[in-house]
Amino acid sequence: DTAVSQTPKYLVTQMGNDKSIKCEQNLGHDTMYWYKQDSKKFLKIMFSYNNKELIINETVPNRFSPKSPDKAHLNLHINSLELGDSAVYFCASSRGASGSDTQYFGPGTRLTVL
Amino acid sequence: TQLLEQSPQFLSIQEGENLTVYCNSSSVFSSLQWYRQEPGEGPVLLVTVVTGGEVKKLKRLTFQFGDARKDSSLHITAAQPGDTGLYLCAGNTGGGNKLTFGTGTQLKVEL
């Protein structure tokens, strides 16, 4: 009965590679997010989709491209990986895009770029 | 860029002690949330405060939103080992559901 799930849990790869992280929610929510948590535990929003439409797009390198095939899925593709991309990436979802809608986070994907 | 500073950054205490974590900003937030994150997991929402001066209690945890809605505090009474974790405040400026997270407070409660 996992609410927000991410795959893979761990990802170790070489610089320059392209990789994807997948996220799925079974809560029936309309809004999904991607966050990046750095080594100092600072959590920062990257993207948000509402009903498959991009509504938040923070200052993120264009090597990062989110894709929402349907409301239940939000994937993150990263091209030409760099050392600085190493972090834990969290997916989250909420019922809607209102400030009163609680965000539910997935377990995270720890990305290590060597 | 809005910044939410939390203090202290690290806190190690004995079971039974009380503690307070602070979350401060120069920005006004329409609401402020507190999350707890355990190792290997995502943050979990503890509480949302909306009104300036609002106080909410969750068992041994007391949350307060500043009168000017720029700061907040989390007080834990009689801390237990199960309270160990990373505490994060997050502010919402009202432009959609975009959260600005604080710098985090890592709490360790020892027996």
Image: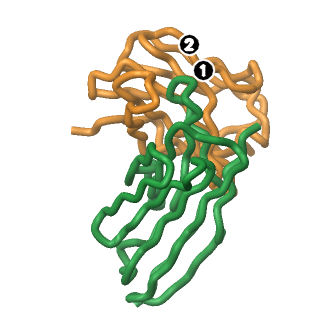
Chain colours: A orange, B green
Residue A44 as seen in the image, left or right of residue A73? right
Give the quarter of the image for residue A71. Answer: top left
Residue in the picture at 75% in, 26% down: A59
Residue in the picture at 38% in, 79% down: B77
The percent position of residue A48, horizontal first and vertical second, equals 54, 22
Chain letter belonging to callout 2: A
Residue in the picture at 46% in, 71% down: B75
Q: Is residue A6 above or below residue B4?
A: above
The crowd level at tag 2 (other Cα within 10 Å; few <14, some 14-19, many 20+) is some
Q: Which residue position is annotated with label 2? A: A54
Q: Secondary structure at mark 2?
A: strand
Chain letter belonging to callout 1: A
Identify residue type, mark 2: Leu
Q: Is residue B3 above or below residue A98?
A: below
Identify residue type, mark 1: Ile
- Number of on-image labels: 2
Between the C-alphas of marks 2 and 1, the distance is 6 Å
Q: Secondary structure at mark 1?
A: strand
For the residues beneath circles 2 and 1, the answer to whether they share a chain is yes
The percent position of residue A92, horizontal first and vertical second, equals 45, 34
**Foreground: A7 or A23?**
A23
Say whether marks 2 and 1 touch (CB < 8 Å).
yes
Q: Which residue position is annotated with label 1? A: A56
